[in-house]
Amino acid sequence: MSSLLETKIAARQHALREQGLLRQRKVLSVDHTLNTNASTSSPRFVFEGRAYVNFSSNDYLGLSRAPELVEALHLGAQTYGVGSGASPLVTGYSDAHLALERELCALTGHEAALLFCSGFSANTALMKTLFDQHDIVVADKLVHASIIDGLQDSGAQLKRFLHNSLESAERLLARHQTSALITESVFSMDGDCAPIAELSALCRQHNAWLIVDDAHGFAVLDGYNNADAAKLIDVQVVTFGKALGCQGASVLGSQALIDFLVSNAREYIYSTALSPANAALALAATQYSTAHPELQQKLLENIALFKRLCREANVPLLGSDTAIQPLIIGDARQTLQVAEELRAAGIWVGAIRPPTVPVGSARLRITLTAAHAAEDIAACVAQLAQVLSRVGVPLVTERQAADDHR
Ligand SMILES: Cc1ncc(COP(=O)(O)O)c(C=O)c1O
């Protein structure tokens, strides 16, 4: 006889499979031909014996394989060993961590920083520690799961405003005595940007903090992302696993906030510290990205090329200007089918389904990086157009015709 938990697990997995929402891992390996074949510089990996061009990573500047950073990690491990050996308040905090914190503060203008092993734990720690049942918090409808989880754990009252709508945010701020407004700089599944300056002005007017999850903007987005960031943003969460190509995260804010988190954030106090080698690596990656603005430029060129080719092929993009280019299909199964057909052509894009995105908005999440070669971007768009029409997903012209009929 099955135990209660076995029955529950089987029933939930069955339901997910039926809805096309079952999640499964895929074992990827390195494409060893990469280093020897200069013409195929695009990010690639091997899955079940076949090589794919990767259009689904967040390694926006292509730094994860940069020889200088491989060397920095190697040197960090030689200097400090491979692990931190303890939580930060025991003996896990070193001069490598301090150097990274200081660099992040210099880059953003914040007074102090606190390092975490991931953006997920940075966000949950911040929300859980900062807020309690006496706080009202206003957040964009599309903020990341880690923010929602942390807020739920905190007991704060959560009010959501319509995605990127200043009017909706202002209505909530006017109606409620709000402690903080939370948004993302670049939205992870839509690729659009929050109006940071305007939200900051609203927050100042209503005496609320502005908290920005900068996971997908840090090191790639201009505008607020400079030594003046702290003038607009009270708390900024940056991550190292996206544009910096490595791992870890930091909360940036006032010295008082960071001291408060050091004494109270359970994720920080009761967890092995980010390894010093990884801190040294993140420092090297931060400095490398600043010293090589041509990488940001190449990324922008690749985004522009992808968008132009999609426009010419009538591939219906969402209108994002960042490295994250979503193509909404709607139905989860059809989204999977399109992604699988692209894979058959050697192109790997993410198929994003609920609950990651709202029901009815399943999508391809295509990401560009500075490392993609123009011919691979062209091949990706050509295959996209072919697969979409084969599977029966309307292209722009057909969508417009349907709209005109309504
Ligand atoms: C907006 C956003 N915030 C936070 C995170 C979590 O960061 P990490 O991957 O470092 O845990 C992610 C990761 O997907 C994200 O997209």
Image: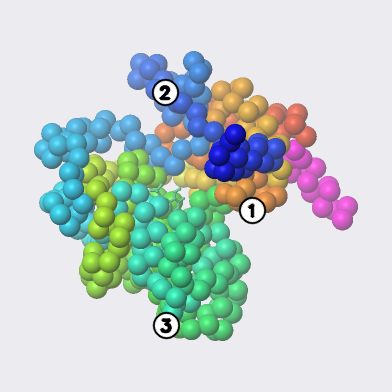
Q: Nearer the viewer, mark 3 or mark 2?
A: 2
Q: Which residue corresponds to the image point at 23% horizontal and 64% vertical from the top-left?
A: 262
Question: Label 3 sits on what residue type?
Answer: Asn
Pointer 3 residue: 207
- Disc 1, ligand 1: is the CB inside 8 Å? no
Q: Using a 10 Å C-alpha cutoff, classify the residue at mark 1 as few (fewer than 14 neighbours), some (14 to 19) or many (20 or more).
A: few
Magenta-colored span: 393-406
Q: Which mark is residue 358?
A: 1
Of labels 1 and 2, earlier in sequence is 2
Q: Secondary structure at mark 3?
A: loop
| Foreground residue among 291 and 333 | 333
Pointer 2 residue: 29
Task: Establish if 382 lies above or below 12.
Answer: above
Prevailing SS of the magenta stretch: helix
Question: Label 2 sits on what residue type?
Answer: Ser
Image position, residue 233 (x, y; %): 38, 69
Q: Which residue corresponds to the image point at 46% horizontal and 72% vertical from the top-left?
A: 156
Q: In the visual, does 92 lie left or right of 304?
A: left
Q: Which residue corresponds to the image point at 30% horizontal and 63% vertical from the top-left?
A: 265
Indicate the quadrant where residue 115 lies.
Answer: bottom left
Query: Residue 398 in magenta?
Result: yes
Q: Which residue corresponds to the image point at 29% horizontal and 53% vertical from the top-left?
A: 116
Q: Quarter holding the N terminus?
A: top right
Question: Label 1 sits on what residue type?
Answer: Pro
Q: How many marks?
A: 3
Q: Secondary structure at mark 1?
A: loop
Q: In the visual, does 299 lie left or right of 89?
A: right
Mark 1 vs 2: CB contact within 8 A: no
Image position, residue 365 (x, y; %): 57, 42
Indicate the quadrant where residue 12 lies.
Answer: top right
